[in-house]
Amino acid sequence: MNYKEFESCGLKRSLDLLSGKWKPLILYHLFQEKEIRFIELWRKMPRVSKKVLLEQLQQMQEHHIIERIEIKGFPPQVHYRLHDDTEPLGPALQILEGWGKNR
Amino acid sequence: MNYKEFESCGLKRSLDLLSGKWKPLILYHLFQEKEIRFIELWRKMPRVSKKVLLEQLQQMQEHHIIERIEIKGFPPQVHYRLHDDTEPLGPALQILEGWGKNR
């Protein structure tokens, strides 16, 4: 395997995109809730600042893992949901969730 | 979700254990080869020192993700293979591999 193949290893790319301190938790909640307000998501997360949570969400948006939805109103609301491309990961993340619980 | 629940989130635990610079690659090769000599695995990896590869393998052994097999002989050989507990991850890693390829 040369460096180019290494860079294109799908498994490495996936795990790079999905792992980190907060991303697994964000995914976990979004798979459960389908769509969630920013403030509710923040309340579900332990000990993370709104700033850090927003940064993580922005990265996941850029990678088309999640979508940001702005709902007009007074005040306007910001919701997040999984990107359609992320839905096929459901069965994989469920297996990982079960496997991780016993560790 | 309080901090205790956060710590026990299976998805977070799994992604923590499987991600990193070299672990996805090691898994990728071990799922393909079933059992592999250390030196062959090292040759398949791009630009990693034997020392770093060994450290990664030791961590994965401690977490019961892989097994180290010593085959007596002259010289003795060291092989690695997946731990039985890791086999159920096959379908999940396959989904992640496919998903990551398109990113």
Image: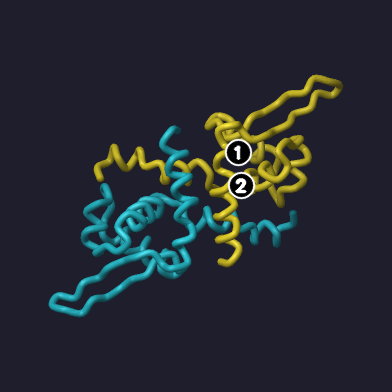
Chain colours: A cyan, B yellow
Q: Chain of mark 2?
A: B
**Gap in angstroms between the C-alphas marked 2 and 1:** 7 Å
- The residue lying furthest to the bottom in this view is A72
- The residue lying furthest to the left in this view is A74
Q: Name which residue type carries label 1.
A: Gln
Residue at 70% across, 62% down: A4
Q: Is residue B86 above or below residue A9?
A: above
A10 vs B13, left or right, is: right
Residue A70 at x, y = what percent?
27, 75
Residue at 26% across, 47% down: A46
Residue at 26% across, 48% down: A47
A37 vs A96, left or right, is: left
Image quadrant where one finds the N terminus of chain B? top left
Residue A40 at x, y = what percent?
22, 58
The residue that label 2 is drawn on is B22
* Label 1 Cα neighbours within 10 Å, binned few <14 / some 14-19 / many ≥20: some
- Quarter of the image where one finds residue B23: top right
Residue A64 at x, y = what percent?
45, 69
SS of the residue at dot 1? helix
Residue A86 at x, y = what percent?
46, 63
In front of the other: A90 or B1? A90
- 2 and 1 marks in contact (CB < 8 Å): yes
Per the rendering, the mark at residue A42 is none
- Say how many tags the image has: 2
- Please determine if labels 2 and 1 lie on a single subunit: yes
Q: Name which residue type carries label 2.
A: Trp
Per the rendering, the mark at residue B56 is 1
